Image (tube, helix red, strand yellow):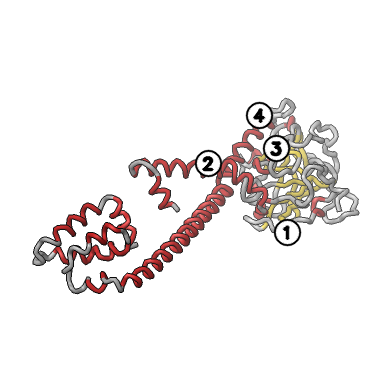
Amino acid sequence: MTISPEGVAQSDGLQPRWRPLGAPAAPATPAAPATPAAPAGSTPTGTATATATPTSTLPPPPEPGPGASPRGGPAASGKNRRQRRQQRRRRRSGAVIGVIGELLITVGVVLGLYVVWELVWTDVEANAEAAVVREQVVTRKDWVIPPEGSEFAEPRDPAVDAPPVDENPLAVPGFGEAWGTLHVPRWGPEYNVPIVEGTDRVKILNKGLIGHYEGTQGPAEIGNFATSAHRTTYGKPYNRVAELVDGDSLIVETAQYYFVYKVYGREIVYPDAIRVIWPVPNDKDGVPTKRVITLTTCHPMFSAAQRYVIWGELEYWADKADGPLEELAAQG
Amino acid sequence: MYGWLWRYTPGPWWVKVLLFAAVAAAIVAICFTTFFPWLSPLLPFNHVTVGDEEPPTPAPTAQSVE
């Protein structure tokens, strides 16, 4: 650190200052208190920079004071050179450490930015994309808007009155097609997230949508209607999955019908546990008789070491043409 | 490193501040629009489906998968 200002001094700013100081020092009387101080201060400068100019100017003041004389002697030059080398080495290693430190700080800042992006910005983007898809779904030509002011839709028991799976034109949608929405009263009256065919992470789930596992059954079908969505990022549709208790409604709204499932079970499994979306969950050879919905999302939150799984069973269904669903209307 | 950049950035201090701010904003923008979206699928924090290890396109049917 002591050297760097001198390097500057040699180039421009300080050089004209100390030269005039040194020059009057030789002819001037030693009585002036400032003069001994000036050469004493400049002595290490001259030796450290090791150029011809400072050394040539330094000899003229031969009586700088007793303190400075041992340093300026020729015997000391070897020691000074060693000091200089040490200083230079120290300076270089210090610079390297400084650069490494700055790089580490930069990496830390970038990692922090990544967390902000992941936890905040993906929600912003995904919510916007999901809103667009929701608009597309509810403005489909075949999307029935329940008539206002009419009676509530009559709840129909699937055991007595089989749900219209085959008549539903959206029973077999193509990949990436949004064909319905999910309402979960437990997650608030506003909760209404589009369900899209497929569980591709980038194309579907990262847009704040609920993905339907391709190849699993459709809504209200006998078997397993399996879905997946993010829990902590990208709009986090299944963020509050752990709040669901048995008996909570999971309402799948398609173009013409409401399908109301009731939560009956949950399990935390490892990611390879594809058994949870079998037609009969956890029973490979079972013959499906129930109409099951499955929700899968990551667990624990902010990790993906495991999966949180919720199961529900179809309790009743209703025709949207008959009127709004009482459960949804009651929420406001 | 940053000291070196600061010293070799031309102009008065406020020009340097503006330049540094512009470059920082550009880097953040590149991160948010390109780098992080590319990075995110490679990290295991966002996997929500079961059977993640399967290739995503030929989706397994519930019956056929082990």
From the viewer's perspective, tell me whether residue A31 is left or right of residue A95: left
Label 1 resides on the chain identified as A
Q: Are marks 3 and 1 in contact (CB under 8 Å)?
A: no
Instruction: Name the quarter where the C terminus of chain A is drawn.
Output: top right
Neighbours of disc 3 within 10 Å: few (<14), some (14-19), many (20+)? many
x then y, percent, for residue A121: 56, 44
| Subunit under mark 2 | B
Is the residue under label 3 in contact with that under label 4 (CB below 8 Å)? no
Question: Is residue A82 or residue A288 the one in the foreground?
Answer: A82
Q: CA distance from mark 2 to mark 4?
A: 46 Å
Query: In the figure, is residue B47 to the left or right of A44?
Result: right
Q: Which residue is mark 2?
A: B29
Query: Residue at label 4?
Result: A148
The residue carrying pointer 2 sits among few (fewer than 14), some (14 to 19) or many (20 or more) residues within 10 Å by Cα, namely few
User: The numbered mark 4 sits on a residue in which chain?
Assistant: A
**Numbered disc in front, either 2 or 4:** 2
For mark 1, what is the residue?
A268
Closer-to-camera residue (A273/A190): A273
**In percent of the image, x 25 and y 65: which residue is there?**
A43
